[in-house]
Amino acid sequence: MICEEIHKAISALAVNYAADQICVLIDEKVADRAASILDPQWPTLSLAVSEQKKSLETVQQIWDFLFAHGITRRGLLICIGGGILTDLGGFAAATYKRGIDYINVPTTLLAMIDASTGGKTGINYGGLKNSIGCFAPPIETLIWTGWLETLPTKEVLSGFGEMLKMGLIVNDLWGALLRYDLDTMPIDSLQPLIAQCVEEKERIVAADPKEEGLRKILNFGHTFGHALEEKSMDAHARSGIEPLDHGYAVVYGLIAELYLSVTKLGCPKEPLQQLTHLMLHYYGKPNCKCSDREALIALMQQDKKNERTAQINCTLIQNIGSPLINQVITSEEANEALEYLFSL
């Protein structure tokens, strides 16, 4: 059974890295299903996580758990869950006693494609997504696509949004993603595409681990996407409106940034038309109003990717597989892209 193989892999890695203790951080939604991975002797903290709980208070819970069990600097933390949990666990591990090793076991498509690889860890702060964090890669990420068999459709779509981003910045992925029919094809048939996305991301991260150049291509769709996500989190806090899933926000951000790619860089219109079709079919329209544009632009000006205060910095593409980093856009251009997105 594959879960037993994951257990063996964790134990082997603990030996290889000379860990003196193993402890587990797990999303409570998968705690029952993950029972065969866990050893009763491993101290385990089960958490209910959400974007609203991606906070310093939750990290403090994890630190308290590690201290309570006497975890030393040679300890090993196993993070089992989606991207929010692996971000939290990685940040807690990186800062506990100046850093302990950790392993990610992603249980959602979004975490497999994005959050669990690359070493970005962190929390939301000041209303801004992932504004506090550090680069701290796990010693290993153990991916088993069997987790996806019980994943809600909405979470599959969220992860597929990040796959679409990879398809737009990597030459030979986009066509395969366009041919994949989420309505009819079994989830396990995604495995080759997942493997290709992970391999491409690992190649990019290996060449630029601290995001000083090449790795910025992975931010395509995220300048606008993060602003939309942050705005939805604020709306949730004020009125209880359901916040936007990350992958949905990325798809909407890709539409806006593809529009700018067409108008500023002369990118062909076809990818924008293709993604618009996918968005309307699978994701629906963003729940935003034209009156939100000013607030969204202000959030983009505060984005951590900007190199200067009040600047809006994007990754755009000249064509599929030809991204350009550090593209500065004006507030007027951002407003125009949002107007296009909201008009669909």
Image: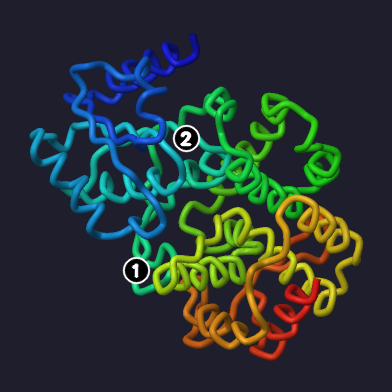
Q: Residues within 10 Å of mark 2 (few under 14, many from 20)?
A: many
Which comes before the other along the chain, label 2 or label 1? 2
Q: Is residue 231 above or below residue 20?
A: below
In screen coordinates, is 210 left or right of 19? right
Is residue 325 in view?
Answer: no
Q: Is residue 113 above or below residue 189?
A: below
Q: Is residue 285 above or below residue 69?
A: below
Q: Residues within 10 Å of mark 1 (few under 14, many from 20)?
A: some
- Looking at the rendered image, the quarter that the C terminus falls into is bottom right
Residue at the spot x=64%, y=69% of the render? Answer: 287
The picture places residue 28, in percent across and down from the top left corner, at 34, 36
Check disc 1 and report the residue beneath it.
125
In screen coordinates, is 235 left or right of 318? left
Is residue 169 in view?
Answer: yes
Seen from the viewer's position, the closer of residues 182 and 77 is 182
The picture places residue 315, in percent across and down from the top left corner, at 66, 68
Q: Which mark is residue 106?
A: 2
Seen from the viewer's position, the closer of residues 277 and 190 is 277
The picture places residue 297, in percent across and down from the top left corner, at 58, 83
Label 2 – label 1 distance at C-alpha? 23 Å
